Amino acid sequence: MTSTNQAVTRLDGPDKVTGRARYAVEYGANDVAYAWPVQATCARGRLDRAETDAALAVPGVLDVLTHENVLRLHADGEISPAHMGALPDLLLLQSKDLVFRGQLVAAVIAETPEAAREGAAAVVVVTEAEHARLELTVGDDEAIVPDITNDLSPGHVARGDADRDFADAPVRLDTTYSTAANFAMPMEPHAAMATWDGDRLTVHASDQGPPWTAMTLAGLLGLPPSNVEVVAEYVGGGFGSKAAPRPPIMLAVLAARLVGRPVKVALNRQQSTSLTTYRGPSRQRIRIGAGTDGRISSVIHETTGQTSRLTTYADQTVSATRLMYRAEHCRTTTNVLPLDVPTPAWVRAPGEAPGMFALESAMDELAVQLGMDPIELRVLNEPETDPESGLPFTSRNLVSCLRIGAERFGWSDRRPEPGATSDGRWRLGMGVAAATYPHYLFPSTATARVDSAHRYTVRIGAADIGTGARTALHQIAADALKVPMSDVRIELGRASHGSAPFAGGSMGTASWGAAIESACRELRRRISAGGGIPDEGLEAGAETLEVMTPSNFSRHAYGAHFAAVRVDRDTGEVQVDRMLGVFATGRIINPLTAKSQAVGAMIMGMGMALMEAAEPDTRFGGFVTQDLAGYHVPAHADVRDIDAMFLTEEDPNLGPIAGRGVGEIGIVGTAAAITNAIHNATGIRIKDLPVRAENLLLRVAVKAGER
Amino acid sequence: MNTDTRSMVRITVNGKVHEQQIDHRSTLLDLLRETLRLTGTKKGCDHGQCGACTVLVDGQRVLSCLKLVVTLDDASVVTIEGLDTDGVHPLQEAFVARDALQCGYCTPGQVCSAIGAMDEARRGWPSLVTPDLANAEVELSTLSREEIRERMSGNLCRCGAYPSIVDAIEDVARQDANGTV
């Protein structure tokens, strides 16, 4: 009996349900102080000065961190390559240029959180404000096509001549979509406690990747990497927003340096909206050329997003389009417009989530135009090899996901004509959408030890941000050591355990697991080579290499989402009755925690579809929706019957762990399944996310021919 | 005029009496986390919008971020750390068994809120989705999933563990025979 492939309850469950699990600023420290940010109130301009006398007079205030007394950072220091985009936002108070509303202009450090906050309110910030550009528009002269987008693919990619093919195609669809900006809004806001001991630094941080964060902090502070420890044993969610160090971590470090005491920084929701990144809004246009039989010959997918003045960031919004369907001709173009806004960055499936909303909605539109079933249209256009690279898929199984899902969900009960099914005031509908997410692997290190009592300890620098990685890695380690899980202790979440990639890109379990498996096997080899375990125990380390998988394959996870919705004929209210996700993600180490992750991502996808809108403040900058009363996320009452299942897959070309990761695919395509179901219920095509009841209000009845 | 910004407050937390000078601005949440070092109660929004800071005050669920300590003289507070002095509360076990958590940051609030909600149902309190408010027949052991969802909607979970949280609460509620849980 193996430990992997079993539904093992979460290893850290007991610590989490009892409150024993400690998150970043829950560690104690003698003499700890608290820092509270002071933020710019203009979106563009120049800082003249921060007047601190009144703040310093507040009882309990220790000092005010300003551009005058801040430690000079080494902007050209060696940092993690993954943090290049995050770097400019980390250079706190190093410049007087103000480039977005909410930028840090000072911070008050005090004995108590109350005093720090009162002090921050007393700081007088004098700025020279300038006219700011705050509105995302399409076709702007200042927009650029970036050399590379976030997944390293170019901003402009073409195969064949899609524009010419589309112009001549017998069936043509030309349609536009938009998605709102989204916040990650993890339940634990970004937080950190920094402690200096001479030139050694320890940061307890809410962070998805302690080793890389330590490397970047060391580079920016001019310290040897071994002088920086980052601890993230428990992290209250991140969804990409904590996959690079963000300003709160650096603020704790700089404030602690200034006052010579440990300093805690715990952002509130309002501060988080400008200092911890967000998923940028998108404006997309899709053109599909097809034959009258439904065979797609060309796809053109263009997107426009925004970036800040600090860095050119562009989601890979159009990447999935290049490999989803058999189209001889394809062009994708990414435009990005620099604005005086906070820097957008990673939020769960950055690019794939908004991009597949558009593509999968367009596929539904095309199916309607052709009079075809949307599942059959997708099956008809299933490619045999990756249409972009020409490489064979390690496995694909998208058709199986669609077929099995249709069977389970009762797709045959769906009536294709919109508005045909109702339940009292409610119009009912079903929708489908496909999903995909790339399979990434990254080099990692791990160590395995055994003591003379045959107790094993496995260490890795990675963080479990709620994914269940701690449990899955424990299972992998036990199997590799050929011992029961109870003989193995797993320790993670520390930079000093060695380099490991962040928890992101759905690559954690496969990347870390490979290193752990390798270290455990090496330890077993040493135990048998030495004929037993010496009194001092034995240790083995492993470092996986860049090339862990054959390169001549296209490696992606696939899935299918099904949704059944009801729309109130009179109020436009939408309820999601049922959702089913069927995923082909290779080997599943722990079906219990994997399902939780997939269901959770589907719920976040429901939020993206129906409620989540980070509304830009186009007059003053930043966002209007600054808290959880304005930025709505799904609550218990919104979430009814949601199920996820994984196909049984054996895929030998995925690397040692043979799993593709399940963290993100659950949010890819989800929104389209819901809005396609809304179309089936009402005849109204949702083009802009999130769905707003007012957009369905009158039109539901009009479309149904009742007004 | 009394300009003192602090007052002596006597408050019981998990059975232990604390008598101390309290800054009038201090919330119960900050007292628990920063002063008493009971960090099981979480700060998710500090604004009464997420439920992560839910504790039981005199037996009822309360958002500790919205409660000033100075208003709690002689009150008795139970936090996630004090739910069951004998070990683990059945609801905590059910959360683990059902995988009703991921990152765990909302979990203590979900558990405390569920205990409060179950107690409200045991008393027969109706909710927004109870069919007939005038003649409400509410029993914990037969509480529907819709009722559980409604009563738990003040507790956000960004990881999306909602279906499993309802499973866990349902498991424990079903075992309830006149308040044995």
Image (tube, grey):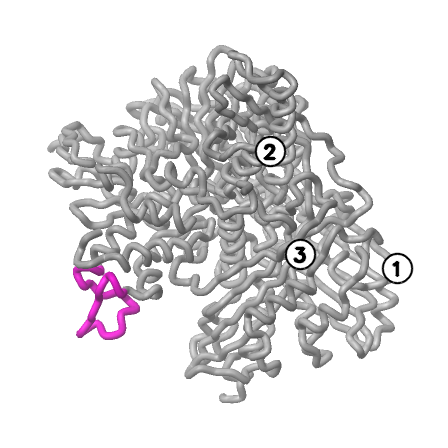
Viewer-nearest of discs 2 and 3: 2
Q: Which mark is residue A480?
A: 2
Label 1 to label 2: alpha-carbon separation: 48 Å
Viewer-nearest of discs 1 and 2: 2
| x then y, percent, for residue A543 | 67, 26
Q: Which residues are magenta?
A: B121-142
Sequence-wise, which precedes: disc 2 or disc 3?
2
Viewer-nearest of discs 3 and 1: 3
The one of A650 and A570 positioned closer to us in this rendering: A650
Q: Is residue B129 magenta?
A: yes
Q: Are the two marked residues, 1 and 2, in contact with CB atoms closer than 8 angstroms?
A: no
Around disc 1, counting alpha carbons within 10 Å, would you say few (fewer than 14), some (14 to 19), or many (20 or more)?
few
Going 49% across and 10% down the picture, which residue do you hit?
A198
Left or right side of B108 for A141: right
The residue where tag 1 is placed is A160
Around disc 3, counting alpha carbons within 10 Å, would you say few (fewer than 14), some (14 to 19), or many (20 or more)?
many
Going 60% across and 20% down the picture, which residue do you hit?
A527
| x then y, percent, for residue A42 | 51, 41
Which of the chains bears the disc numbered 1?
A
Q: Amino acid at mark 2?
A: Ala
Q: Secondary structure at mark 2?
A: helix
Q: Secondary structure at mark 3?
A: strand
The residue where tag 3 is placed is A558
Going 57% across and 67% down the picture, which residue do you hit?
A562
Q: Are the two marked residues, 2 and 3, in contact with CB atoms closer than 8 angstroms?
A: no
Residue A246 showing in the rendered view: no
Label 3 to label 1: alpha-carbon separation: 25 Å
